[in-house]
Amino acid sequence: MRIANCHVWNRRKAPPQQHMQGHPTYPATPAVYTWLTHQTCILSGSWGVVVERRDYPPSIHPIPKLRDVTLDDRYNCSIGDPQPPNRVDTGERVARLRQEMANYGIDAYVVTTNDQHQNEFVADADKRLQYISGFSGSNGQVVVTMTEQALWTDGRYFLQADNQLDCDWLLMKSGLEGVPSILEWIKSAVASGGRVASDPLIITANTWMDYDASLAEAGITVVAESTNLVDLIWTDRPPYPDDPAFVLDISFAGKSWEDKVADVRSVLAEEEVDILVTTALDIVAWLLNLRGSDIPYNPVFRGYVLVGEDRVQLFTPPEKVSEEVASHLHVGDCDLNLCVEIFNYTSIEDSLRALEDDPDVSKVQVSGSTASYAIYNAVPASKRVNSQSPLPDMKAVKNEVERAGMRNAHVKDGVALCDFLAFMEKEITAGNYWDELSAANKSEEFRSQQADYFGLSFETISAFGPNGAVIHYFPDEATNVPIDTSSLYLVDSGAQFYDGTTDVTRTMHYGTPEPFQIEVYTRVLMGQLDFAEAVFPASSGTSESMIDILARRWLYEVGLDYRHGTSHGVGMFLYVHEHTNPAFKEGEFMSDEPGYYEDGEFGVRLENVVEVVSVSTPYDFTGPSLTFNAVTLVPYEPKLINTTLLSPRQCEVLNAYHERVLEVVGEELLNQGRQDGYDWLVTKTAALPC
């Protein structure tokens, strides 16, 4: 060992000591620990002087003490405090819910943001949590007792929830030290012998069974109440859409639904499963090459599918099956074709129970992590197999037609967004009035001009100044503010095209940015570039969590971070947040979106969609390798980039990306006669000094 490299040796060898302590898989015995400490001796000193070996005893990691979350923790909830414009008073609704709880003999009632298919984004008719609490985020859980009410959510929504919840709500910021989990709080709020209830359709089976087992230890009973108590008090609850489903042409889907079913049957045969229960709406749509309009921004329709060697059954409201859909699925034409049988949506549970008496069915596969407890419980216990469906992984890896469509959709999206950003820069610097809402509407207008446009893929996050610090901020009449030259403007937007789904975020400044804004923008950009540059063996099982540090590294370096994930899957004309495989696979599409949020000041986020692709390497010790290729083609803001922070490689990659954006999107801008967008693009993609 070269003494000059002593610090490198320490950095590489010290971590095993730390990780062996208390490791769940490799518990360190005293003998093993003593050997390990001698093998990883600490080397330090000026230019490599070797100091004595030290045997450090295993550290004790105390369990964080739970703290008492109170109403005093809430924002603007003291007497005389100004109230946020989007705060919702739900006192009367909660009082009526408590009356129903008393009628049903319930001590605590649980409400989630989920619908009965466990969707992240739901139809207006399923926004029960928003109705009872006022919180409109996509992830939340509520518990109401006879005296208290609490909401749990993740770091994306801390600011939003604090603004929207009235001051009678406890806000549980999940993940922060000392904040109790739902189960911990229920055990402290409900006495032994108490009854906790929820609708078994809106909680997954695995979660329900965890609740049941944990609360039973405290003498608390979990009650599956099929009558949803929120629905009882929601007198003006909107109806579900009655639009029919529609066929996605094979030119976009790339593979017939018959071939997909054949693939599924092959997997079921290998696993000796007779029936596969499919509850996720994007899986139902993908499998049958159908789309719908039942959930805003998500082209799906309500339905369940059962697949077996001798059956394909679709349970959906009758109005979803038009003549076009019936013909597509060969309904009633089973003699010469693979056909789909249609059943009423509400008959799914009875049909599952009837499998008990079906002699041809021995094993029914249902996923307890995605199916509701009601659906899971309807499957006969003697035949039930609780395991992951093969369908999410099959859908996540796009076929060649889908991959080409996704790339093409992002070219169109790049044209629309470049044209929009060029327009906004010209308007704002000229002193013309624009606000968050009007800008969001304008961006949608530009997208709608592109071929095969279906709609937005989510509500546009159009956030100026302090609103940009609210990670999932959506402007409304109460919060809408003007966009000017004084701060950062963050726009996170996307579209549903028939050939692909897009999701892109850019942060702009139409005036003179502050040095700190430039620094954090640059560090976020550096993380995004490094994440996309990752190369790893295809067989290594590499997942998002294993390379997440690449996106956060440059923020960590100066003590900064962000409270959301770095990556999510993206569907093909389906969900903008899609299930991904446990490990990256070629043909998947992911987001790459680090950020930074200064509460009360501004937000920075940069998001590209990337495709998992194969890459050539000089050696192939572990076989083929994978990396990412950005399919989002929108330039960054040069005035927000401090090139002195960039490494030579980062600068080279950034310039190459901008060159590709100009070549691909620039050509299409000119083809569409969008000269203003092209001229703007030329200025934004000029090479930066490396």
Image (tube, rainbow, N blue to C red):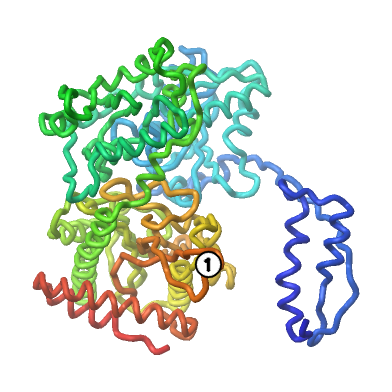
Q: Residue furthest bottom?
A: 689
449 on left or right of 483: left
Quarter occupied by the C terminus: bottom left
Kindly indicate the quadrant of the structure image that contains residue 11.
bottom right
Residue carrying label 1: 550
In the rendering, at what x and y percent does residue 288 appear?
25, 36
For image coordinates 85% across by 50% down, the residue present is 29
In the rendering, at what x and y percent does residue 509 appear?
33, 73
269 on left or right of 150: left
In the rendering, at what x and y percent does residue 654 appear?
38, 78
For image coordinates 27% across by 53% down, the residue present is 402
601 on left or right of 284: right
Residue 101 position (above or below residue 429)? above
* Residue 520 in view: no
Q: Nearer the viewer, residue 155 or 655?
A: 655
Q: Nearer the viewer, residue 120 or 98?
A: 120
Residue 241 position (above or below residue 476)? above
* Local SS, label 1: helix
200 on left or right of 677: right
* Residue 214 in view: yes
Amino acid type indicated by mark 1: Leu
Kindly indicate the quadrant of the structure image that contains residue 273.
top left
For image coordinates 13% across by 31% down, the residue present is 327
In the rendering, at what x and y percent does residue 664 appear?
22, 73
